[in-house]
Amino acid sequence: MIVDVVIVGGGLAGSLAAWRLRERRPELQVRLLEAGATLGGNHTWSLHATDVAPAALAWLAPLVEVQWPRHAVAFPGHRRVIDHPYLTVTSRRLHQVVSRALGERVSYDCAVATVSRTDVRLADGERIEARVVIDARGAAPVEVPLGWQTFLGQEIVCRQPHGVEMPILMDATVPQVGGFKFVYVLPFTTDRLLVEDTAYADEPGVAVDQARANIAAYAATRGWAVDAVVREEQGSLPIPLGGRIDAFWPGDVPRVGVRAGLFHPTTGYSLPDAVTSADLLARVNPFTADRVYSEMRQFATTRWQAGGFYRMLNRLLFRAAAPADRARVLEQFYRRAPALIARFYAGRLTTLDRLRLLSGRPPVPLGQAFAHLRE
């Protein structure tokens, strides 16, 4: 039997694509292959409410664990609350909703050996034929220069209410050791928090023991009596400093997610692009391998081209600024107008926004800044 579409990888992008196709294109036979026991793995994804279209927020709503009307940032010389809604999707909620919607169309513990344009071969020898195969298996090695946002997060339960009323997207008042360091905090309930020890670092990977100690120290300074650590996640998000989108698109198999180069160029966050990709896929007609490949590659190319200014800023952050000075770069950014900050995260900077971001004396050596601007 040949199915209409096989999506390889039940992470964020693959799950959203399969779910959206099931909802919007019920005439298509969709099959989702996941290597693990659940969809989404062990992750938390977030976005600002203006990162995607209002209609997309509406269909994403069942996956949202918590939404807050505002968020905060903190730096040694600047603290601020921004009245800008922020939402979080958890892998637990993703699995609950998408697995229920797809039912037997999902195959778990599915080790994939090879992926081609029209078939998938599993490690046990099974061959699955499809009119369209979409590769959504997460990050793959690419030949582009990268920095990294690395993190280890712990979901903790406090003995008493923690008193945090809104997300803290960056608390950079912590010691700046080995790169730009900050703590990211999401208050899920009055006694439950996700606390991430995060760095903008030159190399991927997390020093797990040190990160755990940093979280414990941060909790102690905030006066949180930790009753239990109920979950832990870690990762390294790519921050491109240059390169071409072609590096993400070898071969002729359509891709979605980080594997396709679809993530925010300065944060590495992939939820907004995964949402937009799922909507785009559901509109492709006719739904053929050629058409899907063309549409998804064009979408990734357009996004990559729009990210050129961001990659230039990334070079200023990672190459022109010394690791200990990177916090000053972000502190200067967070002194800008809230509307500009929102457009930055949504990838919709105006020409005036770009001029404003480059105006004034940068908190990096001017000679190095100009060299990397020319690059």
Image (cartoon, rainbow, N blue to C red):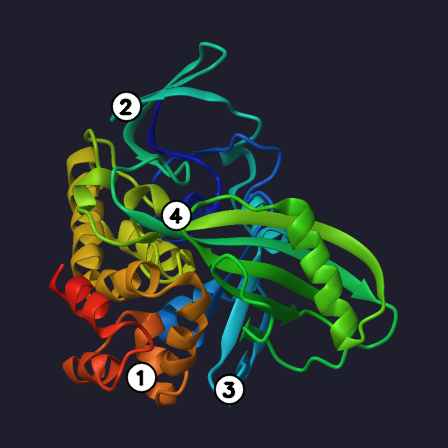
Sequence order check, earlier mark of 2 and 1: 2
| Callouts 2 and 4 close, C-beta under 8 Å | no
Disc 2 marks which amino acid? Answer: Ser
Please indicate, yes or no, whether residue 243 appears anywhere in the rendered image. yes
Tag of residue 77? 3
Compared with 213, 111 (above or below) is above
Q: Quadrant of residue 279?
A: bottom left
2 or 3: mark nearer the eye:
3
Distance, label 2 to label 3, CA atoms, is 53 Å
Where is the C terminus found, in terms of image quarters? bottom left
Residue 255 image point, x, y percent: 29, 40
Sequence order check, earlier mark of 4 and 3: 4
4 or 3: mark nearer the eye:
3
* Residue at position x 34%, y 59% in the image: 318
Disc 4 marks which amino acid? Answer: Ala
The residue to which callout 1 is attached is 340
Sequence order check, earlier mark of 2 and 3: 3
Distance, label 3 to label 1, CA atoms, is 20 Å
4 or 1: mark nearer the eye:
1
How many discs appear? 4
| Callouts 3 and 1 close, C-beta under 8 Å | no
Distance, label 4 to label 1, CA atoms, is 30 Å
Q: Is residue 178 left or right of residue 356?
A: right
